[in-house]
Structure formats: structure tokens, C-alpha cells
Amino acid sequence: MLVSIPYNKSENILLSIDDELLLGIFEPNEIPSLGAQEALTQALGNGIMTFLEGASNVLVIINDATRPTPTKAMLAALLPCFEQAGISDDNLTLLVATGAHRPVKDGELDQLLGPFKERLSPRLVSHEAKDASSLVRIGVTRNGTPILLNKLLFAYDRIVVTGSVEPHYFAGFTGGRKAFLPGIAGYETIVANHKLAVSDTAHSLALEGNPVHEDMMDALTHIKAPVFSLMTVLDKEQNVVAATGGDIVESFGKAVEIATRVFCVPIPQKADIVVSIAKFPMDINLYQSQKAIDNGALAVKDGGTLILVSACREGIGDQEFADLLGSCSSPDQALQMINKSYKLGYHKAAKMASVCKRMNVMAYTELTEGQVASLFLEPIADLQAALDGAIAEAKSKGIERPSVILLPDGCVTVPSLS
């Protein structure tokens, strides 16, 4: 069978896979959609106008360009509501929830704002986690995490949070409360929160008992202004399947239920070889693309092979992450070092080391061979040759018919044994 593999922003790679070996091509499930405009209009309903009554200004929190959130469509639905409520653009601020990521680049404004670029770019502010002057310290979570959030939260009558909800490899799910932590949190807060990701209970789909999620929920209790949440759930083509609106906890909960139906896919068994693709825009760097590794690993037998496909357009993406793994000679040594001292990015390193300890991980990227090898990954220049080689290697170990699973959208596809 010839399969077209998405790569980079608009490329495709043809991959030949023996039908007899292919267990399946597993993608997020097909869920009927109302369409973006209707879904967003229904989610806003009459609730948004009631929410805006008496407001003189509004802070809108939006995702950065590394997320597939349909911010343009959400703004198209929200702006008429603001106008109807008498909120002028001068009394509107868009705060980009960059977390610990870099600020938004000018070239990304079209992706974020679309037809509203000229109108709204003067009203856009990128959160900067290390800018102490932009933060306020407001409390501590049950896990001891200091809560520092962007002080703009306390300068507006109303807060509107936008986002998209899909499984997240240590927060359980994206969206909702993540807009605040890590979205607009201080670096100190993000580090302490992400340190909790090394916990065994911090994994994809897990909310109850997940200390990372608990931290995020605790941060919400310190926000005084009324919050309206507009969450979307996207399908495999990144079209809006559904949208939820209203109270942030209720809106997030409803979106989680829908996202579970979309992204969790049953597989008949684990495979000897899994090919997991990080699609644009999640292929921006290896740090973001690791979601495809973590999800793909769920479908790989112990001792099997995982092949990551990601352009990694902007390199590795986190120097602390790269420095830690690069300084260690083995996954075991990396895990030992992480247990002794933690820095932001080490949670990613811990997950990476754990996966590489359990299986062979190859990577087809635009990174140099040295960069890839320093992360305990095997660099590959020819995807077809790598797959054929992995099959041959499995056969040499006595596996007569090595099984193969393909995840075309590995960052947002969570395999589960049926």
C-alpha cells in the first residue's frame, strides 16, 4: 500500500507499507460537525451578552501560533458581540498566551488574526514569562507552586478565554485552565508546575489525581474578574467539530468529553513498529513534536521501533531540554540527573528518556544528525529505507510478520487498546 505522509507545511512523502503487516492507519475519529460559524454562534448563545453587561473593557486571551486553535474564526464570532455591548477596540486587548515560548513574530499575525490583522495588531500583547514587571504574585497552589500571573488580568472588567481542547501528554488535556497556567504565568510558576509532569499520574487523558491539572485549577481560584470561556474541538483536518462556551470549568468539561470521542482511537494490539507524524503547525520544533513521540509510544511493543516524522522547522525548540539529554550517555543517566535537579524542559527530557529506554526511536527531520543523535534518537535520511530496515530488524529477531501502525496526526491521536 502506498500512503501519503504529510511533511512540513505543504509537502507529502509517499511511503510503501506491506498490507499484510499494516495493523491500521489510525486517525482522530470522524465526528459530525456543525461548521465553525454555527458551532461558535451556538457556544456563545445569549450567555456572552449577559456576561458583557456593564463591562467597560475586555481582555481576550488567545493561543500563540504553535497551536491549531482557530483564533481567526473565534474573533469573527466574538467581535460583533463586543461591538453590540459597546466595547470599542480601544477598550479591547488581545493577550497571547505564549507560556514560556517566544513572543509572537510579525509573520505569524496573519495566522492568528487573519482579516483582523490591521485592526487588532495594535491591540495585541505577547505574554513574556520572564518579564517580572508584567507579573503579579497572587498565591500558592495545593502542591506548593507559587502563582504569578500577567497583571493585565487585574486591569479589565471581563476576561474572555479562547482555546482548543485535545489530549495533552502530561496535563491530561489542553485548553481551558491552561490559558492561565502556563499560558500567561510567570516563569517561576511554569517551572514549578511542569516539574510535576514527571509524576506517574501526569499523562494523556488524566485529570483526576493529576498534579499538573490540579495546579492549573488552583490558579483559576485567584482570578477575580468574571471569565467567559470559548473552547473548540477540532477534527483531524483542524476544522471545528464543536465549540463550548460559558463558565470555564463547565465549558472545559464539555469540550473534554467531545475531545475524548474525537482523539482516542482503539487499536487491536500494540505494534512492532509505529510511524507517528507531527503535522504542521506542531512540527515547529522537536520540543512540540514530542507529543507525537509520546502518543506513538503508547502503541509500540516493548523493544519495538517508533519512527517520528517532523520537519522541526525551528530546530529543537528548548535549549535546557537539549543540553540535558546531550550531556548524558544514556536514558538511564538522564533520568537520574532529572531526579537530582530540575529545570524547565526537563519534564520533556524525562518523558523522552523513558520512551527511548523502552524502544528504539528514529527521527526523520530537518535537524542535523548530531542534534538528533544527542537526544537518544536515531537520525534517518530516507523514511522508506528506515521503515524497511526496522521491518528487517524485527524479522532478524524471529518476528515472522512484524506489525506496523501509522499515526498520520500523532500529536493529537491517542491510541488505546480496544
Image (cartoon, rainbow, N blue to C red):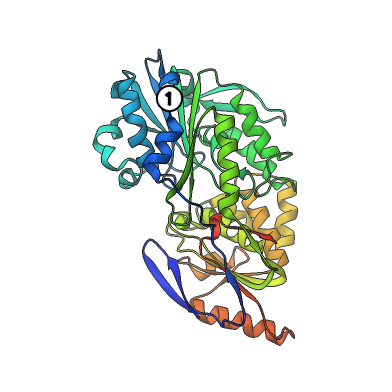
Q: Which residue is rendered at x = 61% and y = 27% of the image?
A: 219
The residue lying furthest to the top in this view is 54
Per the image, label 1 sits on a secondary structure element best described as loop
224 shown above or below 3: above
Q: Could you say where residue 363 lies in the image, as x and y percent from the top left?
A: 55, 68
Question: Could one spot residue 158 in this view of the protein?
Answer: yes
Q: Which residue is rendered at x = 60% and y = 67% of the image?
A: 377
Q: Residue 259 or 100: which is nearer the viewer?
A: 259
Question: Could one spot residue 182 in this view of the protein?
Answer: no
Q: Which residue is mark 1?
A: 46
Examine the image and state in which quarter residue 302 appears.
bottom right
Q: Residue 321 or 201: which is nearer the viewer?
A: 201
Q: Which residue is rendered at x = 67% and y = 42% of the image?
A: 195
Q: Residue 330 or 278: which is nearer the viewer?
A: 278
Question: Label 1: few (<14), some or many (≥20) within 10 Å?
Answer: few
Q: Amino acid at mark 1?
A: Asn
Q: Could you say where residue 390 lies in the image, as x and y percent from the top left?
A: 62, 79
172 shown above or below 356: above
Q: Could you say where residue 83 lies in the image, as x and y percent from the top left?
A: 30, 23
Q: Which residue is rendered at x = 43% and y = 40% of the image?
A: 39
Examine the image and state in which quarter residue 49 appears.
top left
96 shown above or below 225: below
Residue 155 relative to residue 387: left or right? left
Q: Quadrant of the C terminus?
A: bottom right
Examine the image and state in which quarter residue 6 appears.
bottom left
